[in-house]
Amino acid sequence: MNAKTARILDGKALAQKMQSELSDRVRSLATEKGRPPGLAVLMVGDNPASAAYVRNKERACAKVGMASFGKHYPATATQAELELAIEELNQDDRVDGILVQLPLPENLDAISLLYKIAPDKDADGLHAVNLGRLVRGEKGLRSCTPAGVMRLLAEYNIDLKGKNAVVLGRSILVGKPMALMLLEADCTVTVAHSRSQNLASITSQADILVAAVGRPQIITANMVKPGATVIDVGINRVVNPDGSSRLVGDVDFESVKEVAEFITPVPGGIGPMTVAMLLENTVSSYCLK
Ligand code: GUN
């Protein structure tokens, strides 16, 4: 056990700092080029968590002075309708970044929709071209959540070279790109997932542990190496005994903070970093035009 509780990696504060820098940059770019950078968020259906994320993204756009071209579709929207919307946004010179909020309703094919986004407007970095660039270590738009994790680790000068990193989760949104970014930073990376055997024996080897499986508080203190850096990507809504609800991560914060050296809170950790990276990606696309 650590003698003291873990230091908080404050994603909310860093995201605010990034957004205030971006807002200065956006103002001068808009004057120079005659228009602000623009982001289009496509949301389909009424998943309440997705609706909240999309609201946050659109609010953040407005706050830094970027244009936002949100399109909200009913759950009955067809694949063809959404493909057409993406084609139009690809052609629209006011739009620098396009993202499709995931998950989509089950009748829709997210992967083939992501292929329709012009790779240079792929603000979420989920197009095969951008994920391929990441695999090859080439420049390109990087997935926002793992890029936000890397930025937060850098802000706190957390040394990654040669460290054991364990990523729990293998989604294309977080787990896989996260593993690649940690590898790029010279970590020794292990990817664990729902079928991994003896999870605790894997996670307890981690100097850097990233939990991204969407299972409330699955990481408990006994699964964490003393002195580790613990990054919680999970955002899970759980119901309290009195019927109200609250957000918790994939990490049991209260017990793990007694063992770890650094830890991200939920909320206020990686969530705001994802939004800040999305804005940065959109400004990067704008600057490349
Ligand atoms: N769903 C949850 N997080 C994200 C995200 O960062 N991007 C997209 N497109 N969908 C999400």
Image (tube, helix red, strand yellow):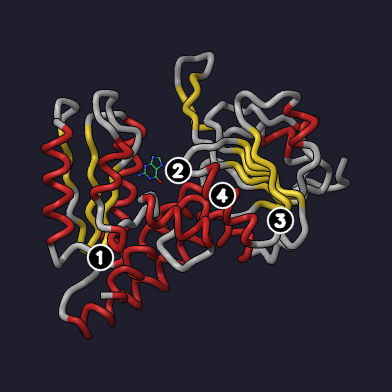
Please state which amino acid type lies under the numbered disc 2. Answer: Leu
In screen coordinates, is 222 left or right of 113?
right
Q: CA distance from mark 3 to mark 4?
A: 11 Å
| Image spot of residue 144 (x, y percent) | 44, 54
In this rendering, position of residue 9 left or right of residue 72: right
Q: CA distance from mark 2 to mark 1?
A: 24 Å
Q: Which residue is mark 4?
A: 178
Q: Residues within 10 Å of mark 1 (few under 14, many from 20)?
A: many
Tell me how far mark 4 sits from mark 1, CA to CA: 27 Å
Q: Which residue is mark 2?
A: 173
**Gap in angstroms between the C-alphas marked 2 and 3:** 20 Å
Quarter of the figure with the C terminus: bottom left
Q: CA distance from mark 3 to mark 1?
A: 35 Å
Q: In the image, which is nearer the foreground, mark 2 or mark 1? A: 2
Label 3 belongs to which residue? Answer: 187
> Residue 139 location in percent, x, y?
46, 68
